[in-house]
Image (cartoon, rainbow, N blue to C red):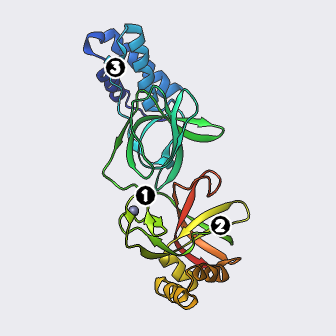
């Protein structure tokens, strides 16, 4: 037995419909339907409210634009349930362009509790999204597809950029380093955009490049392979080679590539445990879905 405040739900329904369409008879009918949906059929409250609003709007001939749908509460990705409406504060992890006519975009969004696929339908409000951006997805509809949840951005949804950094889930990964990509070792970055360059930045031209150290490795945990990028701190913690040591190795060998060779010697085939966070990017690299991971911490297992 559970008690539902149907009166409160009824208020939401009534508030959504322009007053000229609401009389006592409509209220009675709405209340009865809410009771039935929530108490009898255990439909989630939010969904019940929407269903009843839709019903009344249709019965009474309320124009589409005149219905103000109730704001779905902001919840975490891990709390998403199928067939419910929700609002999410998320970071855009990955954006795929769509070849389908009815889908504008699809991709991945996440917060610290998880990552979920989203689909933007062609009749959705127009917006410009970028990977790494933080957004409030308002009133998205949660669906289950092939046993996985995904959120639909529909005509009723709204997406706004927010001034807040949304975190992504951290995961632990343990496995063997089976490859160390080119682009590992002592690299040069543009001081303006931090992009990896070879002397000239495509955007900023000739710049005084700054040295940096990184390792792009492939980790095999026995089930999948993961592309993992390690920054200087993580590389140093694992190998003892930091930026200073890397410069010395390069100077001694008169060859910057000597650093990568040394990293291969110290990392290849080793078992490691890594704390990773998901990042977007990667052109067809990573796990084959274009994803790669950034190591926040790592140690030999
Ligand atoms: Zn640059």
Label 2, label 1: how many angstroms apart (C-alpha)? 24 Å
- What residue do we see at 48% from left, 78% from top? 233
Cα–Cα span, label 3 and label 2: 52 Å
How many residues crowd mark 3 within 10 Å: few (<14), some (14–19), many (20+)?
Answer: some
State the residue at coordinates (55%, 87%).
Answer: 254
**Image spot of residue 92 (x, y percent):** 45, 48
Ligand 1 image-quadrant field: bottom left
Residue 204 on image: x %, y %: 37, 61
Q: Confirm or reject: label 3 Cβ below 8 Å from ligand 1.
A: no
Res. 200 visible in picture? yes
The residue labelled by disc 2 is: 218
Q: Earlier in the sequence, mark 2 or mark 1?
A: 1
Residue at position x 37%, y 8% from top? 60
Q: Is residue 250 left or right of residue 34?
A: right
Residue 23 visible (yes or no): no
Is 109 above or below relative to 15?
Answer: below
Q: Quadrant of the C terminus?
A: bottom right
Write down the residue under mark 3: 67
Q: For marks 1 and 3, give the CA distance.
A: 35 Å
Outermost front residue: 206
Q: Which mark is residue 167?
A: 1
């Amino acid at each position: 037995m559970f008690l539902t405040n149907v009166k409160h739900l009824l208020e939401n329904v009534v508030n959504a419909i322009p007053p000229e369409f609401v009389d006592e008879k409509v209220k009675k009918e709405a209340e009865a339907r809410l009771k039935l949906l929530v108490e009898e059929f255990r439909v989630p409250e939010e969904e019940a409210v929407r269903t009843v609003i839709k019903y009344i709007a249709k019965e009474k001939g309320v124009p589409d634009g005149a219905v103000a749908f109730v704001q779905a509460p902001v919840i975490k990705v891990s709390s998403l349930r199928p067939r419910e409406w929700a609002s999410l504060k998320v970071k855009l992890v990955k954006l795929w362009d769509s070849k389908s006519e009815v889908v504008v975009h699809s991709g991945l969004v996440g917060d610290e509790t998880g990552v979920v696929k989203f689909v933007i339908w062609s009749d959705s409000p127009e917006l410009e999204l970028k990977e790494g951006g933080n957004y409030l997805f308002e009133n998205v509809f949660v669906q289950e597809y092939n046993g996985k949840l995904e959120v639909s951005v529909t005509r009723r949804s709204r997406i706004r950029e927010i001034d807040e950094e949304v975190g992504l889930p951290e995961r632990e990964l343990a496995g063997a380093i089976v490859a160390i990509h080119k682009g590992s070792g002592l690299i040069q970055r543009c001081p303006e955009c931090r992009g990896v360059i070879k002397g000239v930045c495509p955007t900023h031209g000739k710049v005084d490049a700054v040295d940096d150290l990184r390792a792009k490795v492939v980790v095999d945990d026995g089930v999948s392979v993961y592309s993992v990028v390690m920054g200087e701190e993580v590389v140093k913690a694992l190998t003892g080679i930091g930026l200073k040591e890397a410069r010395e190795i390069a100077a001694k060998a008169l060859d910057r590539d000597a650093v990568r060779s040394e990293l291969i010697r110290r990392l290849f085939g080793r078992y490691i445990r890594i704390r990773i966070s998901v990042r977007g990017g990667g052109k067809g690299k990573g796990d084959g879905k274009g994803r790669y991971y950034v190591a926040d911490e790592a140690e030999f297992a």
